[in-house]
Amino acid sequence: MRAIAAYFPATLMAYLLGSTLSSIVIMMGLADMGMPVTAGDVFGAILFDWLGLLGSYLPLVAIALLIALPVAAQLYRRLGLPRTATYMLGGFIALVALHLIMEATLGLIGFAAVRTTFGLVLQGVAGAAAGSVFAAACGVPR
């Protein structure tokens, strides 16, 4: 039951952080092109993305973590890897794989921010944060 209860805040963490980091990368790109970008613009874009991606990105993140976290649990049990680090690695791989699989199968990049390696790695960081939240919510020692 703890794992099921921990799954939801972990998914929310990955969604909110991944969306936020994507918005920031895009706004930084606009600023690099010479467009004036204020803090209000950045916060507005983040809020717009949080609300606008609920029906598309959130379900994809939920599915990716639904696959990755049990796999991470099995790796921990069978190989004796450190639990929190294993969940973080699983979350990282889940979000990076999500974007790479979408590009390979659908021929599209769902987030403009993941067109760069930096943006893709940031999505992985959001997944790693989700893995950490999952481990903490499960009561897993670090």
Image (cartoon, rainbow, N blue to C red):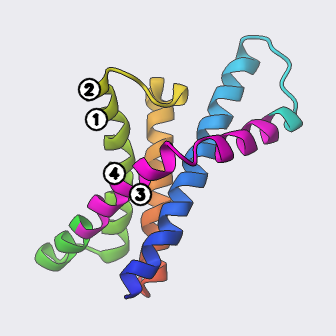
Q: Secondary structure at mark 1?
A: helix
Q: Which residue is mark 3?
A: 62
Give the main secondary structure of the magenta stretch: helix
Q: Position of residue 34 (x, y in %)?
A: 79, 11
Nearest the viewer among 135 and 112 is: 112
- Describe the element under mark 2 as helix, strand or loop: helix
The disc, 4 or 2, on the residue closer to the chain's N-terminal end is: 4
Q: CA distance from mark 1 to mark 3?
A: 15 Å
Specify the amino acid type for callout 3. Answer: Ala
Circle 4 sits on which residue?
94
Which disc, if any, is residue 48?
none
Marks 4 and 3, Cα distance to the nearest angstrom? Answer: 10 Å
Cα separation between marks 1 and 4: 10 Å
Three-letter residue code for mark 4: Ala
Identified at 72% across, 42% down, the residue is 46
Q: Quadrant of residue 12?
A: bottom right
Spot occupied by residue 31 in the image (x, y as percentages of width and height): 76, 20
Q: Which residue is mark 1?
A: 101
- Mark 4 or mark 3: name the one nearer the start of the chain: 3
The answer to whether residue 19 is left or right of residue 33 is left
* Label 4–label 2 contact, CB within 8 A: no
Q: State the CA–CA distance, disc 2 to disc 1.
A: 5 Å
Q: Nearer the N terminus, badge 1 or badge 4? A: 4
Range covered by the magenta-colored residues: 42-70
Q: CA distance from mark 2 to mark 3?
A: 20 Å
Vertical order, 75 against 47 (above or below): below
- Give residue 78's position: percent from left, percent from top: 11, 76
As drawn, 31 above or below 20: above
Quadrant hosting residue 140: bottom left
Q: Which residue is mark 2?
A: 104
